[in-house]
Image (tube, rainbow, N blue to C red):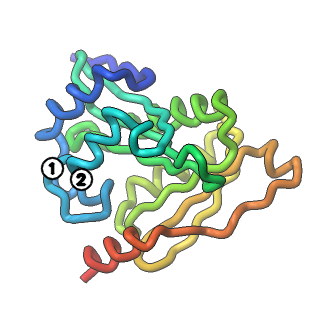
């Protein structure tokens, strides 16, 4: 039996679906997403999803649903009053990983970002997160459906950092900005690599 996967923009009702789906995400998957030893959704993360504006952030999101159950989420967040690039994250339930759901979420979210006028995005992953690297490679090498994003990456402090910049921004003279890793992410990477 083939299950149809639906991707669509995040709605307020998806917070309940995300909470209900928590058992589908292992401690390893949650740790990889939050760069900590999380075995549950962090309370601050759930609170920020419920009212991003009260946290001073703006958020775009996509969800992947299988038979109405949440099996993946992708989001792009940024501080509302900051010139910093938006931050991208993708999370797929363990039993649904390596089936193309991350790619579906990423391409849907990047289209949503493009429509919103976002031209610079950053993402951070542990170097051991080979799924993330494979996802980025598949997006930038897809000649059938080019995304229009230039991607660059580097390794630093046990993390792989990615920058995505819209191609027309690069053509217009925008340059890739220096990489930035928040101090709390450096500390998280150091604690998980020991």
Q: Residue furthest left?
A: 23
Write down the residue under mark 2.
30
In the picture provided, is 36 more to the left or to the right than 84? left
Considering only order in the chain, which callout, 2 or 1, is on the residue closer to the N terminus? Answer: 2
- Give percent across and percent down for residue 167: 77, 45
Q: Residue at x 27, y 19 (%)?
A: 3
Counting from the top left corner in percent of width and height, residue 80 is at 56, 44
Residue most extreme to the right: 172
Task: Pick whichever, 46 or 88, lies toward us.
Answer: 46
Count of numbered labels shown in the rendering: 2
Q: Is residue 145 left or right of residue 72?
A: right
Residue underneath mark 1:
40
Residue 120 seen by the camera: yes
The residue most toward the front is 54
Residue 54: x percent and y percent? Answer: 40, 39
Q: Is residue 116 left or right of residue 94?
A: right
């Amino acid at each position: 039996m083939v299950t149809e996967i639906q991707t669509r923009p995040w709605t307020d009702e998806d917070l309940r679906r995300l909470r209900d789906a928590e058992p589908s995400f292992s401690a390893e998957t949650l740790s990889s997403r939050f760069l900590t030893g999380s075995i549950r959704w962090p309370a601050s993360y759930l609170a920020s999803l419920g009212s991003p504006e009260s946290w001073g952030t703006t958020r775009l999101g996509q969800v992947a649903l299988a038979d109405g159950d949440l099996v993946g989420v992708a989001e792009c967040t940024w501080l509302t009053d900051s010139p910093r690039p938006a931050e991208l994250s993708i999370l797929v339930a363990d039993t649904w990983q390596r089936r193309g759901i991350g790619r579906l979420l990423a391409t849907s979210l990047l289209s949503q970002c493009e429509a919103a006028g976002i031209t610079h995005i950053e993402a951070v992953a542990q170097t051991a997160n080979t799924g993330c690297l494979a996802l980025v490679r598949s997006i930038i090498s897809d000649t059938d459906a080019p995304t229009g994003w230039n991607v660059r990456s580097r390794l630093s402090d046990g993390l792989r950092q990615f920058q995505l910049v819209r191609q027309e921004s690069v053509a217009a003279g925008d340059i890739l900005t220096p990489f930035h890793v928040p101090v709390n992410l450096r500390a998280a990477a150091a604690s998980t690599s020991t």
